[in-house]
Image (cartoon, helix red, strand yellow):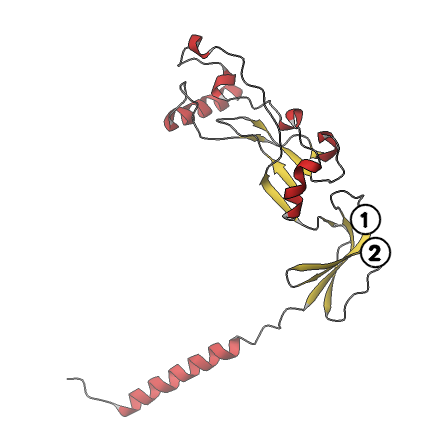
Amino acid sequence: MIPHHPSRAALICVSLTTLIAAELFAQFTDPPPPAAYALERVTIVKPGAEPIAGATVIIRGNIIEAIGLDLAVPADARVLEGDSLTVYPGFVDAHGKAPYAFPEADVDRSEIESWAPPRSVQSFVPHRRVVDYLTATGHDLAAERKKGIVAAAIHPEGLLMPGRGTLLLFRSSANIATELVVEPALGPLLSFRGAQGVYPSQHFGVLAFMRQTFEDVR
């Protein structure tokens, strides 16, 4: 049986009290964040409007409180210089949606050898661009703007390498698709989803196909 030592118990209590006090004190070592931020002299890009240079953005909490020229900065706001910044007041969707329509491959699948299909059937078409088949207008993207999305990268859907995406600014005033385009072609999209009914349909086949393709390019 271990003998009881009152002095040891007291020492443990003092140590625990010291640790708890230190943790509580540490919570107040950092200053609280400001109530608001003022981002000054930035260029504002809004859908449906021309860019505004030299503007100020007031952000309070998680809300954009005000945007414009010659805004009065609130007394409780921290001022941030933004001389070289371009601000999109909303969400930029890295994998968004917009209407486009790729043409179907004009191939008779009954005449295709499953081990040697054409690239269009494999969905290995990295040269194909979404921007060339884009049908969206500003009206089509109204629901996305309502969600707060102001711009998006639109990537092609498909297998293996279905093509190259595009970057769009969701302008409400766009009457044709080209008026939405900021960057016509993004990098080719790479997928490890196998082709349907032809080589490569299995995961290991896809890996072998991709490796051989890059070896051929090199």
Residue extending farthest left? 1
> Can residue 150 be seen from the camera position used here?
no
Q: Amino acid at mark 1?
A: Ile
| Local SS, label 2 | loop
Screen quadrant of the N terminus: bottom left
Q: Residue furthest top?
A: 111
In this picture, is 42 found above or below 160?
A: below
Q: Give the percent coordinates (x, y) of residue 146.
A: 66, 47
Residue 113 seen: yes
Q: Nearer the viewer, residue 178 or 200?
A: 178
CA gap between label 1 and label 2 equals: 8 Å
**Precedes in sequence: disc 1 or disc 2:** 1
Q: Are marks 1 and 2 in contact (CB under 8 Å)?
A: yes
Pick the front one: 63 or 210:
63
- Residue 48: image x %, image y %? 76, 42
Residue at 62 percent across and 31 percent down: it is 99
In the displayed image of the protein, which residue is found farthest to the bottom? 6
Instruction: Give the residue drawn at x 79%, y 65%.
Output: 73
Q: Residues within 10 Å of mark 2 (few under 14, many from 20)?
A: some
Q: Is residue 192 above or below residue 8?
A: above
Tell me which residue sits at (64%, 60%) in the image.
Answer: 62
Please tell me which residue is depicted at 59% across the width and 39% down the height of the picture: 96
| Residue 69 marker | 2
Instruction: Tell which of 86 and 16 is nearer to you.
Output: 86
- Badge 1, how many Cα within 10 Å: few under 14, some, many 20+? some
Q: Position of residue 11 (x, y in %)?
A: 34, 87
Q: Amino acid at mark 2?
A: Leu
> Could you say which disc has been placed on residue 52 in the image?
1
